[in-house]
Amino acid sequence: MRFLSIDKVMSGTKLAKPIYGAHGLVLVRENFELTEGIICRLKGLGYQGVYIEDEISEDIVINNIVDDEIRLEAAFRLEEMLRNKGNLDTLKPLISEIVESVIESKDVVINLNRLCGHHQYTFMHSVNVGILSTCIGAKMKYSRKELIELGTSGMLHDVGKKYVPLDILDKKGKLTKEEFDVILKHPEKGYDMLSSSYNLNSATKVGVLQHHERFDGTGYPRGLKGEEISPFGRILAVADTYDAMTSDRSYRKAFEASEVLEYLLGAGNTGYDYNIVDHFTKCIAVYPIGTCVALSDGTQGIVMHNYSDCILRPIVRNIHNKQIIDLKNDPNYLDVCINGVM
């Protein structure tokens, strides 16, 4: 099994996992062979890729830290909550389940493939930020209680966008100053909403308020710097930036995970707390299991295993002769690196 970019999916490709639509309903079932028409429809709906089975990946098993179904259910419950059709109590068991999964898999790097279309982006992005924040907190030895509070803050970080008009959120061109001023208010709007309507820990609410503050004082809404920003605010800033930059948006295509990691490392102790960025690099799979990659020596391979302490140098299998290449430990490959994703 592997996750393949929707731009590379061909007619006749067999699905390894179902594709979900709005409200978690199955859009295309497992083992279905995709047609040109369905592929075009999925592209139009904003799906970035699908899980497939083929000869290259037939013996590869992808075990996600957090099940896809839980992520989709959490996105649906969050959408219900923000549309005043549900409440936070329906999210709490899912947040607890996510935290337990992260604790049990604390030495495993996480991969969050893009499972949804444009409609669900806001909600799935929030769920992903909750998961990524929880993973960072686990690496930083947070307690279970703290991880639940942090995961809740991450999942609710963008609730203030409920008050931002869709024509601004989805605008493809550059925002006007007036439109950008509306965007700048969403952390405070979210904080006020959570303070007035929900019984939440203060650290959770402050994380929501501060997730756009930056370590050098260039963020908003208060222009705080360094340790003036709460630990939750600093963690959410990293998780939010990573997930947003690795996602397709109405105004740009997604950046490669390796590019975003380079950006975060370069902005350590300027835009972001370097200690948190360092912990984050031990959480994330830049090249997830099942990813086809091109090596600098011309080899084409598929990723078999990731190292949490060396995320840019996984174990790769040559897709032509089946040779196993350990980029971290094999002395014959010390001068070989991954050039990009195929």
Image (cartoon, rainbow, N blue to C red):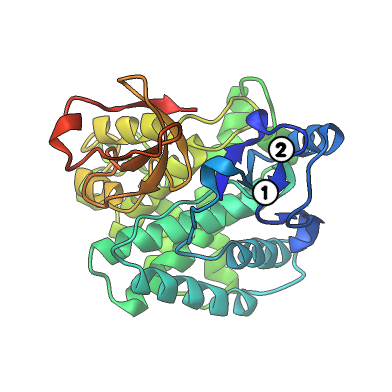
Query: Which of these two is toward me, 312 or 87?
Result: 312
Q: Of helix, strand and loop, which one carries label 2? A: loop
253 over 70 or under it: above or below? above
Tell whether label 2 touches label 1 (CB within 8 Å): yes
> In the image, residue 135 lies at what x, y percent?
36, 61
Residue 143 is left or right of residue 130, and the answer is left
Question: Is 149 on the left or on the right of 325, as rendered?
Answer: right
- Residue drawn at x 48%, y 77% is 96
Q: In which quarter of the image is residue 182?
A: top right
Residue at coordinates 26% horizontally, 52% vertically from top-left? 308
Is residue 166 shown above or below 101? above
Q: Which mark is residue 46?
A: 2
Q: Is mark 1 on a helix, strand or loop?
A: loop
The label shown at residue 62 is none
- Amino acid at pointer 1: Cys
What percent of the width, then of the height, locates residue 37?
86, 34
Q: Give the camera-side residue of 111 and 14.
A: 14
Q: Where is residue 171 in the image (x, y as percent from the top left)?
A: 69, 28
Task: Tell me the CA gap for discs 1 and 2.
Answer: 7 Å
The disc at residue 116 is: 1
- The answer to whether residue 313 is seen in the rendering is yes
- The amino acid type of the residue labelled 2 equals Gly
